[in-house]
């Protein structure tokens, strides 16, 4: 889609790699080893396999290089990279803007099976984004904080 079709657009990193120091890796390894030992003592080998898989995923994810995704708002919906989401699919949106840590735009889908869509605002003007979106979709004014799962993930740096 050409940029002239966007009412507003920006790019954001494909994923956020939190800054982890050696202390974080030390404690993650200790906790993982304890959980692995517990799984062996309880003869719960499936749990042990899950602990190993989680560790592999976290360390592999940390090694990935970030790409950029283009996000744009059109008259018909949202463009996220190569995907398009019609406004008809979306229930509502809300913005959490607490710089420098949290600058996100959230979308809930009408289909409750679909997960929430989180878009980092980067340097986009949240007031302008809100004004544009309110023309097409309802804003959830009850929500003014980031979802609990994202807050926990951010604090644990996972």
Image (spheres, helix red, strand yellow):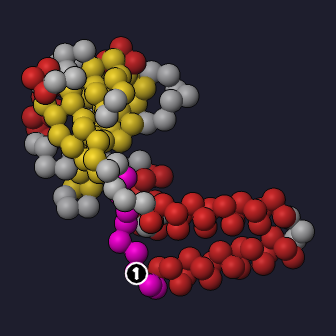
x, y percent for residue 32: 65, 75
Residue range corresponding to the magenta coloring: 15-23
Does 138 sit left or right of 52 as displayed? Answer: left
x, y percent for residue 60: 52, 63
Residue 84 visible to an observer of this rendering = yes
Say which residue appears at 14% left-offset and 20% top-offset: 5
x, y percent for residue 151: 41, 57
x, y percent for residue 145: 33, 49
Say which residue appears at 21% left-offset and 55% top-offset: 98
* Image position of 114 with respect to 18: above or below: above
Q: Mark 1 points at which residue?
A: 21
Does 100 sit left or right of 52 as displayed? Answer: left
Residue 142 visible to an observer of this rendering = no
- Please give the count of numbered marks on the rendered protein: 1
Does 130 sit left or right of 12 as displayed? Answer: left
Mark 1: give few (<14), some (14-19) or many (20+) Cα within 10 Å: few
């Amino acid at each position: 889609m050409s940029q002239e079709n966007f009412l507003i657009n920006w790019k954001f990193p494909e994923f956020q790699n939190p800054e982890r120091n050696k202390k974080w890796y030390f404690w993650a390894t200790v906790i993982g080893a304890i959980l692995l030992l517990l799984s062996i003592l309880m003869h719960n080998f499936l749990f042990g396999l899950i602990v190993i898989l989680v560790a592999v995923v976290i360390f592999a994810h940390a090694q990935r290089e970030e790409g950029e995704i283009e996000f744009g708002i059109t008259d018909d919906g949202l463009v996220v990279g190569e995907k398009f989401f019609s406004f008809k699919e979306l229930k509502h949106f809300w913005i959490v803007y607490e710089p420098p840590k949290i600058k996100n735009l959230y979308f809930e889908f009408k289909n409750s099976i679909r997960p929430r869509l989180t878009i980092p605002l980067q340097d986009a003007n949240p007031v302008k984004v809100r004004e544009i979106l309110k023309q097409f979709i309802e804003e959830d004014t009850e929500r003014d904080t980031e979802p609990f799962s994202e807050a926990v993930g951010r604090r644990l740096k996972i």
